[in-house]
Image (tube, helix red, strand yellow):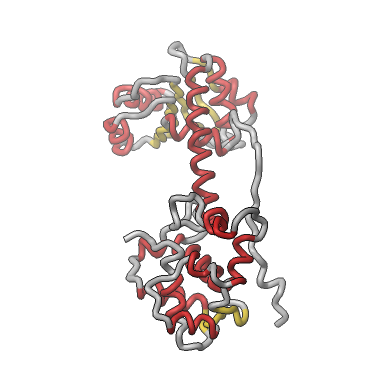
Amino acid sequence: MPVPDYQSLMLPLLERLADGQEHLVREVREEVALALRLSEAERTELLPSGKQAVFDNRLGWAKTYMDKAGLLRSVRRGVFQITERGKNVLDQKPAALDTEALLRFDGFKDFVTRGTEGDVADAPRTALDVPVDSAAITPEEALERAYKDLRKKTEAELLAATLQSSPRFFERLVVELLVKMGYGGSLEDAGKALGGSHDGGVDGMIKEDPLGLDVIYIQAKRWQNTVGRPDVQGFAGSLEGERARKGVFITTSNFSKEAREYVARIDKKIVLIDGARLSGLMFDFGIGVNAVGSYELKRVDSDFFSEE
């Protein structure tokens, strides 16, 4: 089963606090996971950023929303308990809790409408349920999904522009990317080491590290057709001829299954970079893109406010 959305976690979370005692956040988190019978994979699934588990993030927002509604309260750092209002809600034996149900409490209503304009009735859709057709994601997830979609679009545009570039421009692009990634030394050194081949690609050997303790053989093809095993096998033979142990084969298209299986079986270390990965690396290392905006997410530093 997928990780429950944050609204589906509200009631199970509140029920874990029903005894009125103080509870550690980390212990309640584990209790809710056990009550929902989440598998280890579901429990550890990460947000796209890779910095927090989806379940932890959604449970955290469920706690925040119920805190704003006055159903529970933070006693001190990492410890919280149910309030009388929360107990009254449980006494009504609700089948579920969601943001619509929390809107009847002024604290939550003020929270979701803060900084927005228009009807309060529109506030949950504006402030909480982005995109509109999904109540399963938290604000962080909405931002990360939007970023992922924008990145995917930019990468597709990068690949299209690369395919339309001239062979000389493609050679410069590959050189700049490899240097940004830490290979080849300077642009001048890498430019001398790599050169255009007869088929519009790039071939040559570059330094693996600034000291030149090892070298990497490079082949890059600005192709649209799938790169098959014969092409990769020929590349492996070139490594042997150049007494190189490592190689990188870059293409703007893709590699066949047979080509990837061949590379996995041989002793030589060959990395295959297809068009999708190439555009992703260009995005990550700032090749062919400009930054148009930056959004820094911040959380309250509990240590700052600790008086212990």
Most foreground residue, 261 or 17: 17
- Please give the name of the residue rendered at 68% of the width and 72% of the height, measured from the top-left corner: 303
Q: Position of residue 289 (x, y in %)?
A: 60, 31
- Looking at the picture, tell me which residue is in the foreground, 240 or 120: 120
| 298 shown above or below 165 | below
Q: Position of residue 181 (x, y in %)?
A: 57, 37
Location of the C terminus (image quadrant): bottom right
Residue found at x 34% / y 26%:
232
Residue 155, image x, y percentages: 50, 33
The quadrant of the rendering that contains the N terminus is: bottom left
Q: Residue 304 is drawn in which quadrant?
A: bottom right
Which residue in the rendered view is the most extreme toward the left?
A: 258
Q: Is residue 247 visible?
A: no
Q: Quadrant of residue 251?
A: top left
Residue nearest the viewer, comparing 172 with 20 = 20
Rendered position, 199 above or below 273: above
